[in-house]
Image: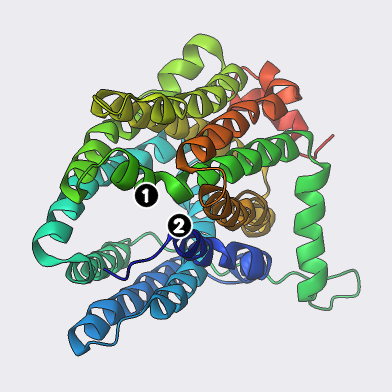
């Protein structure tokens, strides 16, 4: 509707994720100092208001790409707090030996939404226009806040972080402690590197994906939504697999193989024949979904289990800072490459880089882990 080009779309994707670079680390400090459920609720309510501003501006006739940049950035800020808080909140709700099961159940609900969302979104965009579809998205955040209100398990107030003299540890020192914890931990730094590189190249490809599907393959919004929706069944299937796969091959091999699978599946997009692209696109989305979910459930559960409670917020924020910080970089590079070397060629660059990311965990101690219990001696980072 706004006639955006490849570079402007790349900037929009960057605006959504840039907050992970700017406020990601301070967010971890605050989350370690505050109760997490109120942070989640405020994050949902704030995102609902921000997203609702888009259809309002559309109705009034003042919607612009600049507003999308601002809304995307502010929604990204609240998403930083929400994502770090929910990953730090889960260990307070379930026992650590049940973290894989808990994360898998969260992925099942998220994956079910991923399956239903794209086809519904594509249809709504075609029928009601994109701004009105975003209004329904805003309502979904209100529903999310209502569910969070329904959680009744008491949450204790975190103990204050004090230094050797009994004084509260400052923001800068707290951030340094979180960075040092991840950087010196053999398991965490390998996972961080793998995910960061995968996100960099995956989002380099994603920055031009929609343009490629529309301009090179000639797909309509409804068809794209349907393709994404069917492919997203991979997320749902993947959410059912982590415990089963880990029992058969072990935690470490599960992380390594799923990381490689995610990148390899991206090759199916630029290799899809223009005369019959849909089966290739669906297969790519399905395989990516399985790989991403199995990888994320496995590595997030490992991170939560080996990190002390008073470090969870900073560890998760540091990981988010590292692994999400590469997303806007990839989006901008992808937008620039799409306008210079071509959309299809940019997709190949993304697929190659995302595939090689698995080497960071394949060549680390992660590969030898059989269970989360095997990682507990590594909890100190030794």
Q: How many marks?
A: 2
Q: Is residue 322 positioned above or below 27 on the image?
A: above
Q: What residue lies at 23% left-to-right and 87% top-to-bottom?
A: 61
Q: What residue lies at 79% left-to-right and 76% top-to-bottom?
A: 170
Is 145 on the left-hand or right-hand side of 39?
Answer: left
Among the 4 quarters of the image, the one containing residue 142:
bottom left
Q: Quadrant of the C terminus?
A: top right
Q: What residue lies at 53% left-to-right and 40% top-to-bottom?
A: 346
Q: Which residue is mark 1?
A: 211
Is 38 on the left-hand or right-hand side of 124?
Answer: right
Q: Which residue is mark 2?
A: 6
Q: Is residue 192 positioned above or below 257 on the image?
A: below
User: Circle 2 — which element?
Assistant: helix
Q: Position of residue 276 (x, y in %)?
A: 24, 24
Earlier sequence position, callout 2 versus callout 1: 2
Q: Residue furthest top?
A: 248
Q: Position of residue 219 (x, y in %)?
A: 23, 42
């Amino acid at each position: 509707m706004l006639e955006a080009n490849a570079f402007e779309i790349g900037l929009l994707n960057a605006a959504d994720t840039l907050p992970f670079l700017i406020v990601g680390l301070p967010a971890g400090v605050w989350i370690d100092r505050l109760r997490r459920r109120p942070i989640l609720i405020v994050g949902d309510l704030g995102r609902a208001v921000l997203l609702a501003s888009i259809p309002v501006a559309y109705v009034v006739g003042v919607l612009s790409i600049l507003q999308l940049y601002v809304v995307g950035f502010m929604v990204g800020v609240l998403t930083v707090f929400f994502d770090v808080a929910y990953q730090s909140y889960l260990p307070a709700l379930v026992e650590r030996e049940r973290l894989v099961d808990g994360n898998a159940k969260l992925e099942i609900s998220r994956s079910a939404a991923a399956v239903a969302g794209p086809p519904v979104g594509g249809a709504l965009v075609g029928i009601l226009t994109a701004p009105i579809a975003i209004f329904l998205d805003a309502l979904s955040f209100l529903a999310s806040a209502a569910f969070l209100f329904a959680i009744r398990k008491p949450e204790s107030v975190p103990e204050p972080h004090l230094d050797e003299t009994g004084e509260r540890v400052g923001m800068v020192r707290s951030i340094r402690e979180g960075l040092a914890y991840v950087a010196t931990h053999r398991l965490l730094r390998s996972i961080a590197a793998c995910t960061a590189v995968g996100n960099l190249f995956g989002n380099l490809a994603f920055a031009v994906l929609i343009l490629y599907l529309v301009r090179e393959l000639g797909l309509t919004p409804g068809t794209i939504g349907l393709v994404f929706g069917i492919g997203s069944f991979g997320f749902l299937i993947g959410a059912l697999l982590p415990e089963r796969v880990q029992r058969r091959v072990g935690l470490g091999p599960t992380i390594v193989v799923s990381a490689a699978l995610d990148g390899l599946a991206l090759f199916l997009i630029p290799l899809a024949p223009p005369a019959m692209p849909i089966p290739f696109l669906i297969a790519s989305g399905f395989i990516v979904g399985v790989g991403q979910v199995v990888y994320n459930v496995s590595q997030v559960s490992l991170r939560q289990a080996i990190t002390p409670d008073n470090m969870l917020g900073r560890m998760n924020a540091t990981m988010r800072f590292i692994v999400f910080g590469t997303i806007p970089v990839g989006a901008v590079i992808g937008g620039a490459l799409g306008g210079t070397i071509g959309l299809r060629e940019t997709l190949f660059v993304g697929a190659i880089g995302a595939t090689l990311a698995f080497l960071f965990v394949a060549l680390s101690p992660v590969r030898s882990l059989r269970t989360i219990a095997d990682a507990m001696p590594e909890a100190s980072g030794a």
